[in-house]
Image (tube, helix red, strand yellow):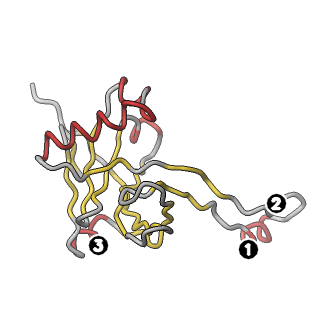
Amino acid sequence: MTSLPRIVQGTILQLRCDSCGSVFPHFLFSGEGDADTAGLCSASSCRKNEVAITEVDSYEWRNFDHAGRASIEKKLAAQFARCDFRVVRLLRVEREGNSAVGLGFSDFQKAYKPPVLVYACVCCATGESRAIEEITIGDFNLAGGRIFLEGRLAL
């Protein structure tokens, strides 16, 4: 009996590096709950408007900031016969200092600013990248972007 592929959902963030000015895509996973996105990882190309998505094993997940990230990139290089996919790391979350204490819900909605996610640049060693656009998978493909799926994954 053949198992069905795992369905991956999400959008594409276009990130721009503050240091080198490069713009590159990053897959932002979404789902109904943690089980829908657990174990999924994406990597981005600096050379082309392309991302790769894979499932990570427990070793890669536990050791992500050490050998895990390199292991994921090596696995993608072997699968797709190219070495330009880099895992995008989230460096920090920047929040505005506005307090919601004492605000009614409608005032809170007006004043709320979502946090800014700051990522490492995949194109240079020291850059920090922020989202400049969020687009659907369909719009990414229409703009010439490509998504590579490793293993038993489907969009």
Q: Which residue is mark 3?
A: 139
What SS does tag 3 mark? helix
Q: Is 82 rendered above or below residue 133? A: above
Q: Which residue is mark 1?
A: 110
Of the pair 94 and 142, the residue shown nearer to us: 94
The numbered mark at residue 100 is 2
Of the pair 110 and 113, the residue shown nearer to us: 113
Between the residue at mark 1 and the residue at mark 3, the CA separation in whole angstroms equals: 29 Å
Label 3 neighbour load within 10 Å: few <14, some 14-19, many 20+:
few
Counting from the top left corner in percent of width and height, residue 72 is at 29, 37
Taking 146 as reference, is 42 left or right? right
Taking 106 as reference, is 86 left or right? left
Taking 97 as reference, is 88 left or right? left
- Report the label total: 3
Q: Cβ–Cβ below 8 Å for labels 2 and 3?
A: no
Q: Is 24 rendered above or below residue 69? A: below
Residue type pointed to by label 2:
Ala
The disc, 2 or 1, on the residue closer to the chain's N-terminal end is: 2
Between the residue at mark 2 and the residue at mark 1, the CA separation in whole angstroms equals: 11 Å
Q: Residue furthest front?
A: 125
What SS does tag 2 mark? loop
Q: Cβ–Cβ below 8 Å for labels 2 and 1?
A: no
Between the residue at mark 2 and the residue at mark 3, the CA separation in whole angstroms equals: 36 Å
